[in-house]
Image (spheres, rainbow, N blue to C red):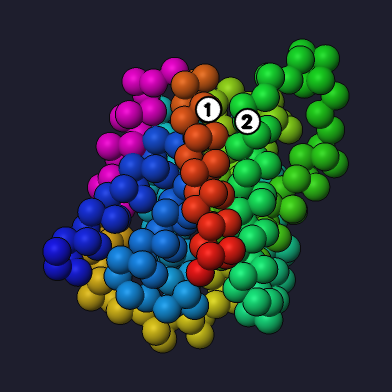
Amino acid sequence: MSVLILALVAGAVVGLALGALGGGGSVLAVPALIYLLGFSPAAATTASLIIVTATSATALYAHAVAGHVRWKAGAAFAAAGIVPAAMAGAAAARLPQSVLTAAFAGVAALAAIKMLGPAPSAAALRQVRPVKAAGTGAGLGALTGLLGVGGGFLAVPALVTVLAFEMQAAIGTSLLVITTNSLASLMTRSGGAAGIDWAVMAPFTGAAILGAWDGKRLAAKVSGPLLQRLFAAVLLAVAAFMLVDVVFV
């Protein structure tokens, strides 16, 4: 199979995940860029942020038109993560890749388990404080910069379990968080763009943007609880794959 076809197929899958689940694009894009398209880990990380920024912005527009974005809460959540994302992005290059991969897998697994747990009670929802929300946003931003991902696979569980968003609103609002954090992290990785093959990146990104529209339509047809379980299953699968990669490769 040619590199162009692989880029188109992988891009479509990444876009579908972002549009339907509000996250998962980076955790799919990075392995695809490395294992299918031959990018180095450093170039794949930077390329993934570029792809996810463009795709999540497109998906954000689609969800905003449908009224699934909570702008004020999402903006505050994202703003808290901008500085941590930039700082962690600058520090990530100094850490061993195996450590980052293991950390990524562990956080993904914990988020999945949290998503599969019981929904917060009404009393617990009323106890959510702005400080807690800001702290969660800052932590998410730091992980975004450190791990080189948009953060949607963590933003959706955080918005559901910490801010008590219903799944559809969490998906739409997470795209605002992803776009903001990805841009902040990308600004610290400008040097990584030198190793990117733009002949592969362009069709990958184009297919991802188109896939995001299909993903949004899929999300509109599936119930919130089912999407939540599907998202958790994707997270667990990604976590298992990455842990195996660290231990046996």
Q: Secondary structure at mark 2?
A: helix
Predominant secondary structure in magenta?
Answer: helix
**Front in this rendered view, residue 93 or 159:** 93
Q: Secondary structure at mark 1?
A: helix
Name the residue: 58% across, 23% down: 166
Q: Which residue is mark 1?
A: 228
Whether the magenta-drawn stretch holds residue 198 is answered as: no
Q: Residues within 10 Å of mark 1 (few under 14, many from 20)?
A: many
Q: Position of residue 29 (x, y in %)?
A: 40, 59
Q: Position of residue 75 (x, y in %)?
A: 63, 45
Name the residue: 47% across, 21% down: 226
Q: Position of residue 117 (x, y in %)?
A: 67, 24
Question: As displayed, is residue 43 above or below residue 126?
Answer: below
Name the residue: 72% across, 64% down: 83
Asked where in the image residue 91 lies, by quadrant, the reply is: bottom right
Q: Work out which residue is located at the far front of the displayed protein and give it.
A: 248
Q: Which residue is mark 2?
A: 115
Which range of residues does the magenta coloring cover? Answer: 208-223
Whether the magenta-drawn stretch holds residue 219 is answered as: yes
Q: Residues within 10 Å of mark 2 (few under 14, many from 20)?
A: many
Marks 1 and 2 in Cβ contact (< 8 Å): yes
201 relative position to 60: left or right: left
In space, the residues marked 1 and 2 are separated at their CA atoms by: 7 Å
Whether residue 81 is visible here, answered yes or no, is yes
Q: Earlier in the sequence, mark 1 or mark 2?
A: 2
65 relative position to 122: left or right: left
Q: Position of residue 16 (x, y in %)?
A: 33, 42
Question: As displayed, is residue 76 above or below residue 92?
Answer: above
Q: Amino acid at mark 2?
A: Met
Name the residue: 76% across, 15% down: 121
Question: As displayed, is residue 171 above or below residue 96?
Answer: above
Q: Amino acid at mark 1?
A: Gln
